[in-house]
């Protein structure tokens, strides 16, 4: 019996028990629908509803679009959006570039590469909080490793607290975010590279193509669908990255590391202005939805261009 | 085009010896096929010639130049892979043009060369497609096109037809033979399929366990196999081997007695034979007609139309296969008699080496 006839058979039995085909199909996905409705749809709808109120711990009343109007009239909001995009762009670019270089090195025929493959895992494997607290210590001006080494080697005359000035705090947070995010990107790229047929490289080598040429004309196009996937997924995760910034700086100093998600948390949870926080959350949802659409669009295009098998 | 010679090529992976002291001289414009069972080292030998593997010892000389230490592109070879190794993200045009792009040829020259190769291989209307949109045979032709555009001295083929279905394989065999004539190039072709070897090769190299068993023309291998291995490997169905005891060795040949009592004098050079030894007498299924000789019981009968392949077993348990005429009056379970013509017999001594036949058809070297 083929799959189709098996399916047909089941449907027939279901119909015999008095269920029409569409009803039977809906019945099958109903549990999943209820579950998703409970954990995704309801909180989302509740957030949207809250964003039209001035909800605090003290109560709430409907205020229409006021939260949004205030938000879009505030210069600070545009600063935060700009910073979030800059944060995302820089961090994702670094993760992709370092991931690509790392994957190439791990894919090379070097002795002990299995060991190196394990050694890149810790940033990803250890709990983020633990890793980030480690970084926080290293950035510390009094007992931090980085400040200490810079003074030891005579690069700095006095100690530096990297998380206490606006610029250094922002870039320090980027470094930590890249540290956490790169191993996964590396492993995905590595897996994609290992999926490229060895024959392609050998054929190119027989034709005289050097390493760089092979990398440019075989490796990159062959793993392009994975690069696009990782770029867009990594963009979404970095956009939403909360715990790294929160543990390092709580969005400070003076808002230098406050991204949209940090701002939302500060307004909604720290200040308990739920209505205003919800409006910010809705903005994030809309932006991420746009990312997701872009992701699906690009993935589809890339697959059509590179993946035609 | 080019000659190719291999001098004492050996290859080991760790302690495993894959190839041992391979000596081979391939003539200009010759079509040579490496054939042998899986793991015999034939693909490794081809990859060593290509420069994809380095030999543990020995030298490779192409057209008088020692290329052993040169990278593949400087050896003047091109290779067609079993998997075709086409770049899925590039069009047929760019796939064929790949070696020319690497060599940084001018656009006009690239277009001219690709167009010419496409014409030879009937791919002109497929140039804008991606490999994924082609059939297996067309992909194979693209792979060949990529090797043609470089004008190599020696073409190397690594089991190029093994991913195709049987009918297409037959067509491609003819096309490859035609291509060889059109390009008049030196070609080396690796296969495990003896039909490809017999039909396409000028000369065949039979490899077994990393050593050359025999190097000769298809008919030479068929009529004068040097060893028991070659005898059973070449020819379809396989040659039958019957044990026999040596009774006498003289000028007229070797006199043997088969199990069951049949005595024959076989016209072979038997100076090395020892009286009382057991030898293997080889008889091809197509040389085993019904008639007075050895009796056996038919186990399975395959009537193919023109021939009836008859699988039988002798009273002492030896398996025997005879290719009888298609309408032969035999049936499964029946006992038949197979006649043995002494001139058709091959004789192999205990170490598997042949005693040369005197009455076999003359072979043009």
Image (cartoon, coloured by chain):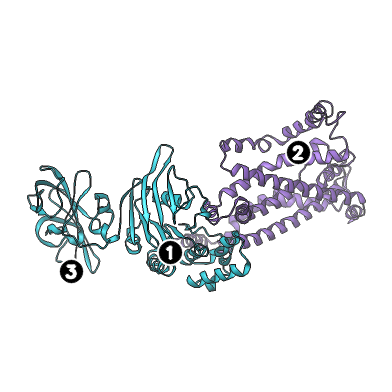
Label 3: element kind: loop
Label disc, if present, on residue B323 of the rendered structure: none
Q: Quadrant of the C terminus of chain A?
A: bottom right
| Numbered tag placed on residue A176 in the rendering | 2
In this picture, residue B331 sits left or right of residue A29: left
- For this rendering, which residue is in front, A273 or B7? B7
Residue B180, percent from left and from top? 41, 66
- Asked if residue B270 is positioned above or below residue A4 in the image, the reply reads above
Does residue B123 appear to the left or right of A139 in the view shown? left
Q: Colour of chain A?
A: purple
- Mark 3: give few (<14), some (14-19) or many (20+) Cα within 10 Å: few
- Separation of disc 3 and disc 2 at Cα? 84 Å
Question: Which one is in front, A232 or B119?
Answer: B119
| The image quarter in which residue A180 lies | top right
In this view of the protein, can residue B335 be seen by the observer?
no
Please, is residue A34 above or below residue B351 in the view? below
From the viewer's perspective, is B7 left or right of B273?
Answer: right
Q: Residue B362, image x and y in percent?
A: 21, 62
Residue pointed to by mark 3: B327
Other residues around mark 2 within 10 Å, as few (<14) / some (14–19) / many (≥20): many
Q: Quadrant of the N terminus of chain A?
A: bottom left
Circle 3/circle 1 CB separation < 8 Å? no
Query: Could you classify mark 1 by the number of other residues whose Cα lies within 10 Å: few (under 14), some (14-19), or many (20 or more)?
Result: many
Q: Which residue is mark 1?
A: B185
Disc 1 secondary structure class: loop
Instruction: Report the chain holding disc 2.
Output: A
CA separation, marks 1 and 2?
A: 61 Å
Asked whether residue A230 appears in the rendered view, the answer is: yes
Callout 1: chain: B
């Amino acid at each position: 019996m083929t799959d189709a006839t098996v399916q047909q058979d089941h449907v027939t039995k279901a119909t015999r028990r008095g269920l029409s085909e569409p009803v039977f199909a809906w019945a099958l996905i109903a549990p999943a629908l209820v579950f998703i409705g409970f954990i995704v749809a309801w909180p989302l709808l509740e957030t949207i509803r809250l964003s039209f109120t001035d909800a605090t711990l003290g109560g709430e009343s409907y205020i229409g679009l006021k939260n949004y109007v205030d938000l879009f009239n505030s210069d600070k909001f545009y600063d935060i959006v700009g910073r979030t995009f800059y944060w995302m762009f820089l961090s994702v670019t670094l993760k992709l570039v370092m991931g690509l270089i790392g994957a190439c090195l791990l894919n090379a025929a070097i002795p002990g590469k299995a060991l190196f493959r394990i050694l890149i895992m810790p940033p990803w494997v250890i709990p983020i909080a633990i890793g980030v607290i480690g970084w926080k210590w290293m950035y510390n001006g009094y007992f931090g490793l980085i400040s200490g080494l810079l003074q030891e080697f005579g690069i700095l005359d006095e100690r530096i607290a990297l998380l206490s000035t606006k610029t250094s705090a922002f870039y320090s947070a980027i470094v930590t975010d890249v540290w956490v995010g790169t191993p996964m990107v590396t492993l995905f790229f590595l897996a994609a590279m290992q999926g490229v047929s060895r024959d392609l490289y050998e054929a190119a080598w027989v034709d005289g193509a050097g390493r760089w040429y092979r990398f440019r004309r075989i490796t990159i196009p062959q793993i392009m669908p994975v690069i696009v996937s990782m770029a867009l997924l990594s963009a979404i995760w970095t956009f939403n990255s909360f715990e790294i910034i929160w543990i390092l700086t709580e969005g400070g100093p003076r808002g230098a590391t406050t991204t949209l998600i940090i701002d939302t948390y500060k307004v909604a949870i720290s200040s308990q202005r739920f209505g205003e926080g919800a409006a910010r959350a809705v903005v994030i949802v809309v932006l991420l939805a746009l990312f997701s659409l872009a992701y699906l669009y690009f993935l589809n295009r890339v697959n059509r261009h590179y993946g035609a098998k | 085009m080019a000659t190719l010679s291999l001098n004492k090529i050996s290859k080991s992976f760790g302690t495993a010896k894959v190839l041992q002291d391979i000596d081979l001289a391939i003539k200009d414009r010759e079509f040579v096929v490496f054939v042998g069972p899986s793991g015999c080292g034939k693909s490794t030998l081809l990859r060593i010639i290509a420069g994809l593997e380095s030999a543990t010892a020995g030298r490779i000389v192409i057209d008088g130049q020692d290329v052993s230490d040169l990278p593949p592109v400087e050896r003047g070879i091109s290779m067609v892979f079993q998997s075709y190794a086409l770049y899925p993200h590039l069009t047929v045009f760019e796939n064929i043009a790949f070696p020319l792009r690497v060599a940084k040829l001018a656009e006009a020259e690239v277009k001219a060369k690709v167009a010419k190769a496409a014409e030879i291989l009937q791919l002109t209307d497929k140039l804008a497609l991606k490999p994924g949109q082609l059939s297996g045979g067309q992909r194979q032709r693209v792979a060949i096109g990529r090797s043609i555009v470089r004008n190599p001295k020696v073409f190397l083929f690594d089991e190029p037809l093994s991913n195709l279905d049987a009918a297409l394989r037959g067509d491609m065999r003819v096309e490859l033979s035609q291509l060889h004539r059109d390009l008049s190039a030196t070609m080396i072709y690796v296969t495990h399929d003896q039909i490809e070897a017999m039909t396409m090769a000028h000369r065949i190299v039979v490899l077994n366990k990393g050593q050359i068993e025999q190097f000769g023309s298809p008919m030479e291998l068929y009529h004068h196999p040097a060893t028991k291995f070659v005898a059973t490997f070449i020819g379809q169905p396989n040659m039958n081997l019957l044990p026999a005891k040596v009774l006498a060795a003289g000028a007229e040949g070797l006199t043997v007695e088969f199990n069951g009592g049949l005595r024959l004098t076989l016209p072979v050079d038997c100076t090395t034979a020892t009286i009382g030894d057991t030898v293997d007498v080889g008889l091809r299924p197509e040389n085993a007609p019904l008639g007075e000789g050895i009796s056996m019981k038919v186990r399975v009968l395959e009537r193919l139309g023109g021939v009836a392949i008859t699988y039988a077993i002798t009273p002492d348990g030896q398996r025997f296969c005879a290719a009888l005429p298609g309408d032969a009056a035999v049936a499964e379970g029946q006992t038949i008699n197979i006649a043995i013509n002494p001139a058709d017999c091959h004789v192999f001594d205990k170490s598997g080496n042949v005693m040369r036949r005197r009455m076999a058809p003359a072979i043009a070297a």
